[in-house]
Amino acid sequence: MQPQTTDDEPISAEEKPKTPESTSEPEASTKPEPKKNLSDNGKGNTEDATAIEAATIPEAGNSEDSGGDLVAIAQEKLHEARAASQTILCVATPEALAATIPPDREITLQILQLFADAGDDGADFEAWLKSTVDRGLGRKARDSRWGLYLADAKMEAGGLPAKRAAAAKAQAAIDISRSRQQAEQAEAEAAAAAEADRPMLAMDAYDRIRVDVQGRGVPRPFKWRLERTGELISPNALAAAIRGWKRCATCQDSGLVGTALDKNLAFCACAAGAEVQHPPLYRELEKPEDERFHKGVAYCRQMIERVHESAKSLLVAACSVVELQFAADVMAECEVSDDGATLEIRVPDTRFAMTEGDVRKVLDRLKWQRGIVITGGRQVNRSHLTPAAIPGPRPVSRPPITQADIDAEIAKRRQKIPPQMEAGCDLTACSSAAGIQ
């Protein structure tokens, strides 16, 4: 709304009529003006007064407390804003308020009219007041009059429609961008959820959930089943299977219980036991007992027959059971003969021979009573070497210390002690004297 002329101002009949000179600089007037009641519900007021009456000033308190005079409230706020803009801390101090004069009602009314059509309950007027403090408008005024404030209000109020339009346009762009981002995010989440439920190869499914399951591997029985059947599984189903899997307490997911040595090797009743009964996936296995693959229903019977085939196979199996893996590896390359009374083991010259104590542990596990004869092996040949045959210097032998040697050493010590220190000398003095000499 454009500022109205002074002829349209709501002035009472008692006031002095305005002239062009008085409207150019209304702040110079020193005559007191009668108080105008702007809340008389339109009685004796013009349309401009009604427009200002409809505007409220934020933080002004109840209109009843101030007598409904919004112009007086605006005068106080303008006075405080000008005083605050003249201080470094932008605070209206008593000294700054005393150094400035408040605006008269006429110029205050003109400033309010500039912001009356905003329809924002005085928010534009309050924002303009704050900007005058931030910009230090009071320090730019050359005198105590308020013409600069009126001109600044006209300039700022004139740009309000454009500012509102620009702000509305920017807010609309922000809302559109936010809506687009939310739609894209919802679409991506829906696509990810659909992908997580889509059946795929187990390897591809695990790659998608590796981070979610914190690097936990697929349980062996479940992995064996997926490898054997080529079953497709979704990432969600695979993650649920990994998190909910419980290891078998009987076989620890190996699928086997008992030992072939005791002839009680059998398949466990758990999922791992059911899985290892299937035939091997690859026929070219070097070791049929390879635990990485399925073994077939005849595996237990075949392993028992293979272990009890000869004395050597029993010894090798017993070494593994008593956790002597080195002895088991050596025993697998040895020549073994057993006549029921004596167990003879011929170790290859390329291997270190096992000890008789290890062989005794194995026989105790088999409950055999045998004499043990171990021949061959690099360690056995080295043990037959005599000290004379070992190259290098021989150790020096020392004779035992006798009482005569002790007495002779004491006599030597006494000869080194001076006569004047023989009586009453302590061990420290004797040692010091001996060191001096």
Image: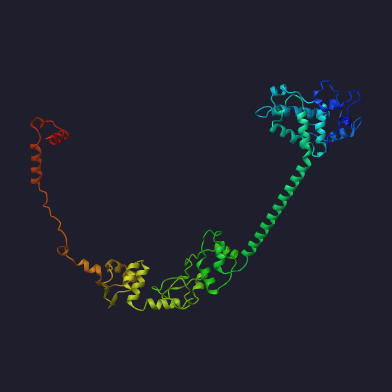
Q: Is residue 256 above or below residue 115?
A: below
Find the residue positioned furthest to the top: 31
* Left/right of residue 182 with respect to residue 16 in the rendered view: left
* Left/right of residue 218 with respect to residue 98 in the rendered view: left
Say which quarter of the image contains residue 390.
Answer: bottom left
Q: Is residue 258 above or below residue 83?
A: below
Say which quarter of the image contains residue 97.
Answer: top right
Instruction: Say which of 117 and 322 sits in front.
Output: 117
Question: Can residue 299 be seen by looking at this rendering?
Answer: yes
* Left/right of residue 231 with respect to residue 12 in the rendered view: left
Which image quadrant: the N terminus?
top right
Give the image location of residue 428, x and y in percent.
Answer: 17, 34
Give the image location of residue 217, x and y in percent.
Answer: 51, 63
Q: Is residue 405 above or below residue 145?
A: below
Q: Is residue 211 above or below residue 254?
A: above
Question: Can residue 270 be seen by looking at this rendering?
Answer: no
Give the image location of residue 325, x and y in percent.
Answer: 35, 67
Give the image location of residue 353, x and y in percent.
Answer: 27, 69
Residue depicted at x 82% and y 31%: 110
Colour pattern of the rendering: rainbow
